[in-house]
């Protein structure tokens, strides 16, 4: 792992851009296609925080996050930004926060991927063997038990809200995205809420390496966040070949404490992130994979100084090609929109 120690200049993340329709991309190995957007990211953030009893998600200058109790006793977490107003409600938040949780985010992503493959049908079907083959579990028995445990959390998540995309607003009434499951002879059927549109759940498709399922939970969450952010950084990827992610945003996304919430700064803030990076790089090296390179850049010293640093993410090979293609498509969309506006202006002038 390459670590540069220097004073941070500009660690702040770039603005989110939701530009590519979910339906336009076909699968390219060795990646899974992953429906993604503000809703899915918010759900995964909540799932991260349910692993840390007594801690609730934090916001930033662009995202206000508030946590309240509903009249029914459910925990409601509101993610509000300029273009989003998302409420995630969870039954028995305190109870599920105490359960061991290793693969719930992986299972959630897997369900999104299978839903995308199966055209977001009401019934999502797969065999437990898929969870074993992708490295999530070692056997069908552990896959069955682990899947059931993860689904107990996922089934408790209700979502509602609105997403703005330009002048268009997509709304969804309150409901469960995945609300039931059945396992028959290791064949799984998961019920998907057909009234909850994919335009609300995910504004675009991104990638996640298939090999990422082999990683430990924190390393997997980091790689998931890296590719979520990459989809928002396509201009920088095309022009520079890399983009930056602030360590503070990563710390928040992973549900780790702030320096004020713990005295164990190395054990609970700094080391977990650096160890996750090392595990990702070791797995790439072991399998001779060159998907991307992660370079932590921070000023050595306190946890506060560490969190002012950032990760430089350099995409390589197929992952870079994919995101550059998305950048070109985005530019073409913008050019077409500008040309259409100019054409309308000319018509109005002539009339």
Image (tube, rainbow, N blue to C red):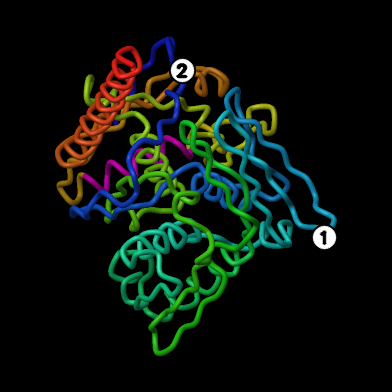
Q: CA distance from mark 2 to mark 1?
A: 47 Å
Q: Position of residue 135 (x, y in %)?
A: 32, 64
Quarter of the figure that contains the N terminus: top left
In the image, what residue occupies the spot 28% across and 69% down?
133
Look at the image and say whether residue 281 sits in the magenta stretch.
yes
| 180 w.r.t. 76: above or below | below
Magenta-tinted stretch: 272-284
Q: Position of residue 258 (x, y in %)?
A: 63, 30
Side (left or right) of 314 relative to 183:
left
Look at the image and say whether residue 134 sits in the magenta stretch.
no
In the image, what residue occupies the spot 80% across and 50% down?
69
Q: Residue furthest bottom?
A: 185
Q: Which residue is mark 2?
A: 300
Classify mark 1: helix, strand or loop.
loop
Mark 2, mark 1: which one is toward the viewer?
1
Count of numbered tags: 2
């Amino acid at each position: 792992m390459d670590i540069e120690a220097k004073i941070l200049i500009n660690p702040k993340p770039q603005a989110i851009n939701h530009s590519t329709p979910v339906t336009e991309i076909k699968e390219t190995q060795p990646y899974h296609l992953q429906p993604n957007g503000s809703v899915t990211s918010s759900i995964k953030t909540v799932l991260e925080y349910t692993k840390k009893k007594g801690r609730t998600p934090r916001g930033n200058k662009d995202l206000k996050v508030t946590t309240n109790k509903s009249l029914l006793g459910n925990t409601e977490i509101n993610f509000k930004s300029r273009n989003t107003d998302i409420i995630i409600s969870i039954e028995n938040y305190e109870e599920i926060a105490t359960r061991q949780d290793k693969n719930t985010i992986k299972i959630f992503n897997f369900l999104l991927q299978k839903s995308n493959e199966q055209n977001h049908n009401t019934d999502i079907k797969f065999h437990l063997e898929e969870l074993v083959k992708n490295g999530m579990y070692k056997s069908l028995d552990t896959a069955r038990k682990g899947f059931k445990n993860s689904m107990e959390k996922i089934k408790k998540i209700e979502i509602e809200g609105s997403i703005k995309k330009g002048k268009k607003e997509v709304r969804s009434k309150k409901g469960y995205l995945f609300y039931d499951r059945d396992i028959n002879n290791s064949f799984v059927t998961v019920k998907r809420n057909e009234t909850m549109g994919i335009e609300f759940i995910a504004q675009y498709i991104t990638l996640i390496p298939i090999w990422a399922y082999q990683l430990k939970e924190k390393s997997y969450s980091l790689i998931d966040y890296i590719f979520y952010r990459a989809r928002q950084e396509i201009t920088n990827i095309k022009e520079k070949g890399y983009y930056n992610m602030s360590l503070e945003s990563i710390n928040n996304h992973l549900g780790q404490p702030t320096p004020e919430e713990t005295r164990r700064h190395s054990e609970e803030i700094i080391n977990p992130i650096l160890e996750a990076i090392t595990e990702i790089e070791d797995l790439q090296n072991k399998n001779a994979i060159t998907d991307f390179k992660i370079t932590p850049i921070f000023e050595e010293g306190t946890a506060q100084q560490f969190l002012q640093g950032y990760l430089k993410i350099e995409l390589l090979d197929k992952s870079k090609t994919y995101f550059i293609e998305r950048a070109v498509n985005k530019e073409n969309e913008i050019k077409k929109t500008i040309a259409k506006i100019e054409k309308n202006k000319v018509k109005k002038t002539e009339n």
